[in-house]
């Protein structure tokens, strides 16, 4: 042990220690700066560290996907839980896109476990749990998702409280709505109801979250249809009684004031007049209790007019006011965006017997500013040329009634006659009831007529015309369900060779049936069976005294395919079509879709024209049939039919081809 010498003063000791420290520091500096071996060693170590870090980084960038399989295990509960979980599973949805690491797979599994708990809660398993495990030793890895539903909760109570207490005017309790004319389609409307228990929710039974929410939402629409347009749910409180395993729902609803449909406030219209909107409204302001169905019907009728791109009809609660009897009147805001009113179009057709034909069309749907429609057509074909005009005024005196008129200037030459003349009609059509319409008017037809065995003669006929029609087709352009029936009667008077008076009557019926149904219950148009029958009679005048353009003919694309135009029926001495005073036609089709836009149609047609006033119903019918091809477009199918006559007329070709737009009936 060193003992301090007397001469070892503190200052000398400190100096010695300082010298030693400085010596060691100098040695370190020399080693670091001047010693090549030390420097090379340090650089080599750093290089190895850098290489290791780079390799680690490369290994991270070159991650290896982790393929996996999924097994869902449900321990109890309802049978559909497994399927519901699979539909909601991230692991199932992305099973063909494996994650880049085991950590990514675990994240997916954890997400699914959280989703599983939410699913269990939505199905009334509020004590349910979910877990997962991953067996990464296997290839592919096995992910097991386990759901333990536990006891399913049932409904304890589902109460509805109305705040404030509803006020029901006496006029809102007993209502009858009559559609059409003379109350032919009258129906009693339900009174407003204010249940104290949530309809459709039964205490003691389990209910899913979706069904519970749907039941709450279903409270309001009936009120909007029975005079309470401002009714709304103000609070929906859901609580759990875990001890009794019960779900309790307490719903609070504000019914709002009882209200009547008020006046219209229209915006967005620049060229359609206010009078049109008022005339189309199915209610009288301040009279009828509010009904969302009436409002929807009104908006749909505006959309169907073709005048507007968009239509929005909503209540205007900021302008609600009381009527003379103290009951609230709620105005209606109508916001529209007008569409172009003019349309120019053209179509073409081809028949083997009549050749090519084209038709140009110009239409104006707001010609006088209140939804009046004027249509001009110009058909040009090998047999007929001319101008056809039609006019329609909606809401003519009543929203269910319209004014109809047409004027045609035509020249037509067929094997039966050559006509140069015109015809006109003016009348009204009115809706009688749901799917029922009737109309009446006056018509006139005249010009010059040349029959093959006679000189050209003038003719003029006219008289009243009336019809009644029932139409329940789901789509007039391409029906798959429903029917259409029409009876028309036209007494006419005039002169042709001599004075004449006769009555023409026609009856037609079409039926459409789709044997298959889609998931929504609507008819599936992949298979449609269609049938059409029609017949007619002219009584009161001899065949020779009836202008040939007023007689009945059959044969061709619009009646019996496979035969030439107007070829079926009586013939004159030159073996040319003569026409008749009665006829009957039958058409049968099976419309089969073989693709989204393509279909094939086997068909059979039959018909006959008679000299007698009444058709024979079962007689010497001419039958034809063939196969058609359809290409379906938004404006109707493009039709190609190839037909052959089963009992041909001398001189008829063995095959007839027809190309046009639209179904045959």
Image (cartoon, helix red, strand yellow):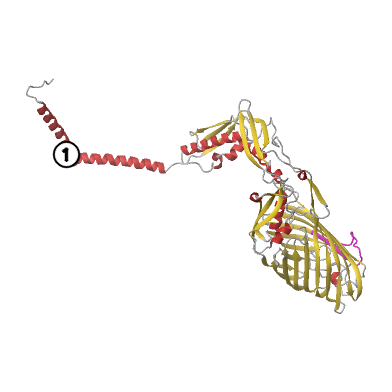
Q: Nearer the viewer, residue 381 or 448?
A: 448
Per the image, the residue denoted by label 1 is: 30
Residue 586 in picture, x, y percent from top left: 83, 59
Q: Is residue 377 visible?
A: yes
Using residue 497 as the reference point, say whether residue 640 is left or right of it.
Answer: left
Residue 519 in picture, x, y percent from top left: 69, 46
Task: Tell me: residue 478, above or below residue 568.
Answer: above
Range of residues picked out in magenta: 604-622
Task: Tell me: residue 169, above or below residue 71.
Answer: below
Residue 36 in picture, x, y percent from top left: 19, 41
Task: Tell me: residue 425, above or below residue 74.
Answer: below
Residue 627 in picture, x, y percent from top left: 75, 60
Using residue 42 as the reference point, say whether residue 421 is left or right of it.
Answer: right
Q: Within 10 angstroms of label 1, few (less than 14), some, or many (20 or more) residues?
A: few
Using residue 232 as the reference point, say whether residue 558 is left or right of it.
Answer: right
For residue 610: magenta? yes
Asked where in the image residue 144 lies, by quadrant, the reply is top right
Quarter of the image that includes the N terminus: top left
For residue 506: magenta? no
Task: Tell me: residue 258, above or below residue 542.
Answer: above
**Residue at position x 83%, y 52% in the image:** 184
Number of numbered discs visible in the structure rendering? 1
Q: Is residue 610 visible?
A: no
């Amino acid at each position: 042990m060193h003992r301090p010498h007397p001469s070892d003063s503190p200052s000398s000791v400190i100096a010695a220690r300082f010298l030693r420290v400085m010596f060691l520091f100098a040695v370190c500096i020399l080693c670091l700066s001047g010693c090549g071996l030390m420097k090379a060693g340090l650089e080599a170590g750093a290089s190895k560290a850098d290489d290791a870090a780079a390799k680690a980084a490369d290994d991270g960038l070159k991650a290896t996907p982790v393929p996996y399989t999924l097994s869902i295990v449900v321990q109890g509960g309802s049978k559909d839980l497994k399927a519901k979980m699979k539909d909601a599973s991230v692991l199932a949805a992305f099973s063909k896109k494996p994650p880049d690491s085991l950590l990514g797979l675990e994240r997916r599994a954890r997400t699914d476990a959280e989703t599983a708990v939410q699913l269990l809660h939505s199905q009334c398993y509020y004590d349910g749990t979910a877990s997962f495990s991953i067996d990464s030793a296997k290839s592919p890895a096995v992910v097991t998702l386990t759901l333990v539903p536990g006891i399913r909760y049932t409904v304890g109570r589902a109460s509805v409280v109305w705040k404030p207490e509803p006020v029901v005017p006496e006029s809102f309790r007993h209502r009858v709505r009559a559609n059409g004319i003379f109350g032919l389609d009258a129906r009693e409307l339900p009174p407003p109801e204010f249940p104290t228990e949530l309809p459709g929710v039964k205490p003691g039974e389990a209910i899913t979250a979706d069904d519970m929410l749907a039941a709450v939402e279903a409270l309001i629409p009936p009120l909007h249809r029975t005079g309470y347009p401002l009714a709304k749910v103000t609070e929906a409180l859901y609580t759990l009684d875990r001890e009794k395993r019960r779900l309790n729902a307490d719903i609070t609803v504000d019914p709002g004031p009882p209200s009547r449909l008020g006046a219209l406030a229209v915006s967005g219209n620049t060229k359609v007049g206010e009078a049109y909107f008022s005339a189309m409204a199915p209610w009288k302001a301040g009279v009828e209790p509010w009904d969302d169905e009436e409002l929807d019907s009104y908006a749909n009728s505006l959309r169907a007019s073709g005048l507007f791109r968009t239509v929005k009809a909503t209540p205007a609660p900021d302008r609600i006011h009381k009527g003379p009897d103290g009951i609230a009147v709620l105005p209606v805001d109508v916001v529209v965006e007008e569409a172009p009113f003019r349309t120019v179009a053209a179509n073409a057709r081809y028949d083997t017997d009549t050749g090519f034909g084209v038709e140009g069309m110009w239409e104006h749907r707001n010609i006088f500013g209140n939804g009046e429609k004027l249509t001009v057509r110009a058909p040009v074909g090998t047999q007929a040329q001319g101008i056809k005009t039609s006019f329609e005024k909606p809401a003519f005196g009543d929203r269910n009634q319209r004014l109809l008129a047409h004027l045609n200037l035509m020249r037509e030459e067929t094997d039966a006659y050559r006509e140069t003349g015109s015809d006109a009609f003016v009348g009204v059509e009115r809706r009688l009831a749901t799917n029922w319409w009737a109309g009446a008017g006056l018509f006139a037809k005249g010009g010059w007529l040349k029959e093959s065995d006679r000189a050209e003669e003038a003719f003029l006929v006219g008289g009243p015309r009336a019809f009644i029609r029932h139409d329940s087709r789901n789509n007039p352009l391409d029906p798959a369900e429903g029917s259409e029936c029409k009876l028309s009667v036209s007494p006419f008077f005039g002169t042709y060779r001599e004075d004449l008076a006769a009555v023409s009557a026609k009856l037609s019926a079409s039926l459409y049936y789709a044997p298959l149904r889609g998931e929504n219950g609507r008819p599936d148009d992949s298979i449609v069976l269609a049938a059409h029958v029609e017949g007619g009679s002219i009584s009161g005048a001899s065949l020779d005294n009836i202008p040939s353009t007023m007689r009945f003919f059959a044969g061709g694309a619009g009646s019996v395919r496979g035969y030439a135009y107007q070829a079926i029926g009586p013939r004159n001495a030159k073996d040319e079509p003569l026409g008749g005073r009665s006829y009957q036609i039958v058409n049968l089709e099976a419309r089969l879709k073989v693709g989204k836009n393509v279909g094939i149609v086997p068909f059979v047609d039959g018909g006959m024209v008679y000299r007698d006033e009444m058709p024979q119903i079962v007689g010497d019918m001419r039958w034809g049939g063939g196969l058609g091809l359809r290409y379906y477009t938004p404006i109707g199918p493009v039709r190609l039919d190839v037909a052959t006559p089963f009992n041909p007329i001398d001189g008829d070709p063995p095959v007839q081809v027809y190309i046009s737009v639209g179904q045959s009936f």
